[in-house]
Image (cartoon, helix red, strand yellow):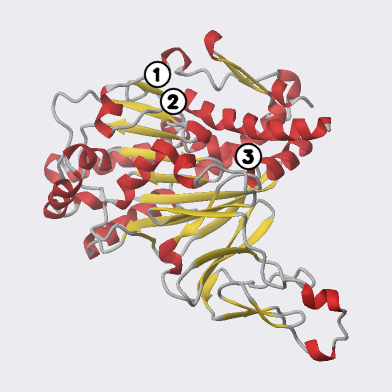
Amino acid sequence: MAISKLIDDRPDEAIFQIDRRLFSDPDVFEAELRYIFEATWNFIGLESQISKPNDFVTTNIGRHPILLMRGTDGKIGAFLNTCRHRGTIVCPFKQGRQKFHVCRYHGWAYDSNGRNVSITEEASGQYPRSFSNENHDLIPVARLGSYRGFIFASLSPDVPPIDDFLGDARTFLDLIVDQSDTGEVEFVPGASTYTFDGNWKLQFENGLDYYHFSTTHSSYVDILKKRNVSAGPEAGFTSEPEDEQEGQGSFSFDYGHAVNWSIKRTQLYGRPLGVDPARLEAVRQRVGNARAKWMLRQRNLTIFPNLQVIDILSAQVRTWRPVAPDKTEMVSHCLAPVGESTAARTLRIRNYEDFFNASGLASSDDNVMYEFCQTGYEATTAGPTQGYLRGAAGVSRGNSVHTRELGINPREWSFGAPSFGGEANFYPGYREWRRLMERAAQEAKV
C-alpha cells in the first residue's frame, strides 16, 4: 500500500489523519521493523548499567538481539548477540559480569570486547584456508553513541550524529541527569517486563497523552484527592511563583521526539527532589533557578522510536519492542540520580510502585485501553479516527516564554489549560515514521 496515503498530514488545513491499518497490517509492521527500528537510533541502556570492565546487559533492536558490554579496556561496545558459528545466542542472561562469553552449542568463545578468542577443536576441524582468513569476532552495531550516560545504537550507518539526532530533546535528559550531584543516573535494581496485546504505537502515543489521565485513571485520581486531604496544606511547598500561569504544554522536535510538561502550583512533598529542601537549594545553586523550576515540573519525554523518560512523582524509563502487529513487549525501570539520600530513594521507589510498576495503579489501566483500541481498529470501514486534532488549532512556532527559559528552539509548541491534553504532540513521531518508511516505498519501486 502507498505509505503516503496512510498518514494524511496537511498542516495548513489543520488536517491530520491516520489510517487504521497502521496499527494492524502485517506488511506495515514488517516494514516498520526494517525501516524504523532497524534503521535509526534506538536507546539500549545506561552507562551506569555497565560501569565496570566486563559488565554486560542484553537487549534488542527490532528483531536483533544485542549484547552491550564494557570491555576489559573500559571501552563500551554493542554487538549482535549471535554466535558467528551457527547463530546461537551467545549470552542468554539479562545482565551480569563476565570476561568471556561461551556459546552453549559448540563452545566458541568471545571476550568482553567482542573478539573471538577460541574455536573449539579448531586444529582438528579440517577447515579450509578461506575459513582461517575470515573474521570470527562478534558483529558490532553500525553506530554507537551516548549522551549523559544514555546509550543509543543503530544497525544502520546512515544516521545523524547522536547529538544532532537528539537535538533540543537533550535539555530534558539534562533535567533528569543534573538532579544528581555526580552527574550520573542509574536504574534502581529490578525491572518490570510484560507484554500487551496491542500495537507499539499505542504506547508511543500514550506517553504523550495527558488527555486520557482523568478518565482512564479515574480511580487513581480519586485516591490522590483523598491523600491530599489527609496530608493537609502544611505537608509541602511549591516552587512556582504566584504569577506563573498554570497549564499544560508540549514541545515537538526533529526526528520524532516530543515532550509534555505541566505547570501546577501544587504541593511538592511527594517528589523525591523535594524531600530535602537543603539539597534542592544546592541543585538550584548549581543549575540556576529556571532549570531547577523545570526539574520540579511534570515532564513526559519521548525519544522516537523506543524510549520514554517520565519524571513526575518518580522517574521512569520505558522502552518497548514490537513483537507482532498486535503484541508489544514493555520494559520499565525506575530511574534515579546516583547519590541521592536514603529518604529520597525510598520515596522514589514507593511512588514508582504506586503508579508506574506493572502492578501499580496506572499501568494496568493503560494496557487494557491499548487492547480495547487494538480491537476497535479492526473496524476498518469506520475510516480514520478523530484522535489527532485536539490542540491542532493552537500549534505555534518560534519562541515563547517557556522556550526562552530553557534556551531551546523546538519545531512546534503548544500550551493550554491544565486540562488541555493536546494531541498535536503526536505529529513529530508520525512525521518521522513516514520519513523513514518512505525508504520502503522507494525500495519497492526498484
| Badge number at residue 377 | none
Q: Residue at x 15, y 54 (%)?
A: 279
Q: Residues within 10 Å of mark 2 (few under 14, many from 20)?
A: some
* Residue 284 placement (x, y as % from top left): 16, 46
Point out the frontmost of discs 1 and 3: 1
* Residue 272 placement (x, y as % from top left): 25, 52
Q: CA distance from mark 3 to mark 2?
A: 32 Å
Quarter holding residue 441: top right
Q: Secondary structure at mark 3?
A: helix
The one of 124 and 276 positioned closer to us in this rendering: 124
Q: In the displayed structure, would residue 104 be above or below residue 270?
A: below
| Badge number at residue 397 | 1
Residue under numbered circle 2: 411
Upstream in sequence: badge 1 or badge 2 = 1
Upstream in sequence: badge 3 or badge 2 = 3
- For residue 103, side relative to residue 353 (left or right): right
| Badge number at residue 371 | 3
Q: Residue at x 63, y 30 (%)?
A: 435
